[in-house]
Amino acid sequence: MKHTLKLGCIADDFTGASDAASFLVKGGLQTVLLNGVPLQPLDVSACDAIVIALKTRAGDPHIAVGEAMKAVEWLQAVGTEHFYVKYCSTFDSTEQGNIGPVCDAVLDKLQAPYTLLCPSLPVNGRIVRDGILYVNGVPLEESPMKNHPLNPMHKSYLPDLMGPQSRYETLVLAQAELASPEVQRQLSVFSQTHEHFYVVPEYATDDDGRHIAAQFGALAVLTGGSGLLEALAQQYAQHEAGGPAAACGTQGGALMLAGSCSAATLGQIAYFQSHGGISLKLDPAKLLDHSQTAAGIWDFVQQHHDADVLLYSSESAAYLNRIRETDLHRYANILEETIAHLAVLALQSGSQRFTRLIVAGGETAGAVTKSLGFNAYWIGPSVAPGVPIMTPVNKTDVRIVLKSGNFGQEDFFFRALDMTKSK
């Protein structure tokens, strides 16, 4: 009998993919994370779920759709039962895309009449009530996401967020409607006049997620943040995750790399520094004029040969707003290039000097993983909700932790160091 994947997920960046994979593992599915669509045949018989990390959150929507279609076609070819389009729980997207165009294309490809928009992740403070996305108790447009360097968010009502970038209508279901036995008939009637459409259910608690998974888990495709994935995994699971995915600590030192400018990451950096952590700030202007260099930064790391070191470029919202129209993209490019180079140096340093990389920020993580060249990872336990420890399939002495900027506790870096170190 041909092996079938219970779930195939495509994510719009690498930290989002690791976030998704962590909740699938928690829900009981043996999960492998792939960095892009495989170019060679891959044996999927040892896993229940596969998450494919793309780099499609920003940039040209047409390119994003093309990459998503390649991922869907690959997942179809290996026998996938259910599909999931994973985007950020803060719905990072502009009015031109890319969430809408990608979801539209997947609906068309799978010939699905409708799907859900479920960005909720209650454990991290993202919930949906009456179609409005809240972040830690305030509407999205009033949260720190209004200052996001690439996709500042100025709306909170999901139909308003989705409308400008999708060809299809969005229907909001209130809690009472969702709980009604007539809801499926209501959706059937709506589908008679709408070839494709989206449904936004009330989703404020983990119980809501389990109810949504039970009611809509049979759909060919679902979309959302990582919150719904644990409930779906519990529904699809046939056994508990184990084997290679359970690996945790390893010998060797750790290099921490932070590019996120989120309030959470800024707080985590400050906590690490105030509790004796060794750190160095990367300055993009100095990197561009060569008064600070990757070689000089690496010398700093080498000088602290017995310590775990944090290198960071994170800045305040006020600073980002000041440079947004002039230097933001130049600065972002040189920082990503430098941080990725330093990550490669760390894993090439030999003698197990560095076997652990802890990275904060989605764009930063994408640049790092691309430079490292690892294409597949077993997913292990999580340092924080949505932030798993990953083991490259072909380099099992290495541990990598990638976190979205807004994720993690104040002492995140110390937790990650402790959990990835061999006891």
Image: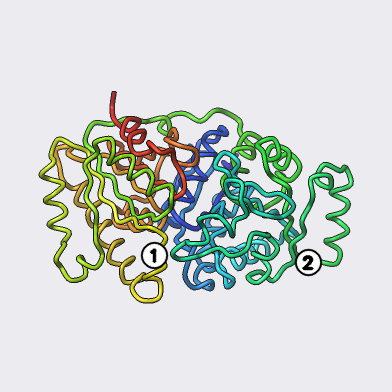
Which mark lies nearer to you, 1 or 2?
1
- When the figure is inspected, residue 273 is found, relative to residue 59, above or below; the finding is above
User: Which label's residue is closer to the chain start, 1 or 2?
Assistant: 2
Q: To which residue does mark 1 refer?
A: 320
Q: Position of residue 283 (x, y in %)?
A: 24, 61
Residue most extreme to the front: 318
Task: Please give the label number shown on residue 195.
Answer: 2
- When the figure is inspected, residue 421 is found, relative to residue 146, above or below; the finding is above
Q: Residue at x 72, y 59 (%)?
A: 198
User: Which of the two residues, 312 or 11, is positioned nearer the viewer here?
Assistant: 312
Please, what is the three-letter code of the amino acid marked with disc 1? Leu
- When the figure is inspected, residue 58 is found, relative to residue 304, above or below; the finding is below
Question: Is residue 99 found left or right of 385 in the rendered image?
Answer: right
Please, what is the three-letter code of the amino acid marked with disc 2? Glu
Residue most extreme to the top: 423
| Label 2 crowd (10 A; few <14 / some 14-19 / many >=20) | some
